[in-house]
Image (cartoon, rainbow, N blue to C red):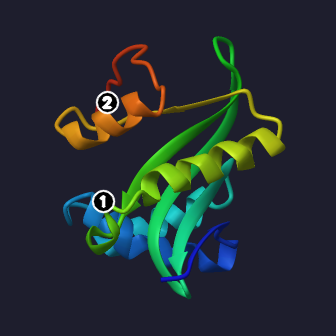
Amino acid sequence: MSIQFKILEKDQIFAAVPLVYKLNDFKVTEDSLSQRFSEMINQNYECAGIYDNEKLIGVCGLWYCTRHYSGKSAEADHVYIDDGYRGQGLGKKFFDWIYNYLINKGFETIELNTYVSNNQSHKFYFNEGFKILGYHFLKKL
């Protein structure tokens, strides 16, 4: 296993679709995800990836903004590591790489949302030093 972390180039962004498709329990079609990624890459967005040799095995979207309460901030989104690679410490290594990447870009904070039912991720994020600041609400229009 030869693990590497890097930012996906814009022309490689669609490689993330199958992993995000699994993350969403196959509820959002791959076509919809592809369309959304094609829009996202032209916004304040990047996607970090975990590669085993040339195979993409994990992703984490990064949204960039400045917020009144946290300063220059990145929001981690759709964090996913393929099932066969879990439990090997890759999540910790990936987030350490992401923290350093963001610090080098001049960011002050990182924040994220996680599904209420994803208890495994809650434990991970608490161990990483994240604090719960509020609730995330969504309304379909």
Q: How many marks?
A: 2
Q: What kind of element bears circle 2?
A: loop
Q: Amino acid at mark 1?
A: Gly
Quadrant (top left/top right/bottom left/bottom right) for the C terminus:
top left
Picture residue at 33% right of the left edge, 73% below the top: 30
Q: What kind of element bears circle 1?
A: loop
Question: Does residue 32 appear anywhere in the picture?
Answer: no
Q: Report which residue position mark 2 lands on.
A: 138
**Where 123 falls versus 16 (above or below)?**
above
Q: Position of residue 26 (x, y in %)?
A: 20, 66
Picture residue at 30% right of the left edge, 59% below the top: 87
Q: Position of residue 35 (x, y in %)?
A: 47, 68
Q: Position of residue 53 (x, y in %)?
A: 55, 86
**Of residues 125 and 17, which is closer to you in this image?**
125
Mark 2 surroundings: few (<14), some (14-19) or many (≥20) residues within 10 A: few
Q: Residue furthest bottom?
A: 54
Compute the Cα span from label 1 to label 2. Answer: 31 Å
Q: Amino acid at mark 2?
A: Leu
**Of residues 27 and 104, which is closer to you in this image?**
104
Eye-nearest disc, 1 or 2: 1
Q: Mark 1 or mark 2: name the one nearer the start of the chain.
A: 1
Q: Position of residue 22 (x, y in %)?
A: 26, 67
Picture residue at 69% right of the left edge, 33% below the top: 65
Picture residue at 36% right of the left edge, 70% below the top: 19
Question: Does residue 23 appear anywhere in the picture?
Answer: yes
Q: Is residue 125 left or right of residue 100?
A: left
Q: Report which residue position mark 1 lands on.
A: 87
Circles 1 and 2, Cβ within 8 Å, touching? The answer is no
Q: Is residue 38 left or right of residue 72?
A: left
Q: Quadrant of residue 102?
A: top right
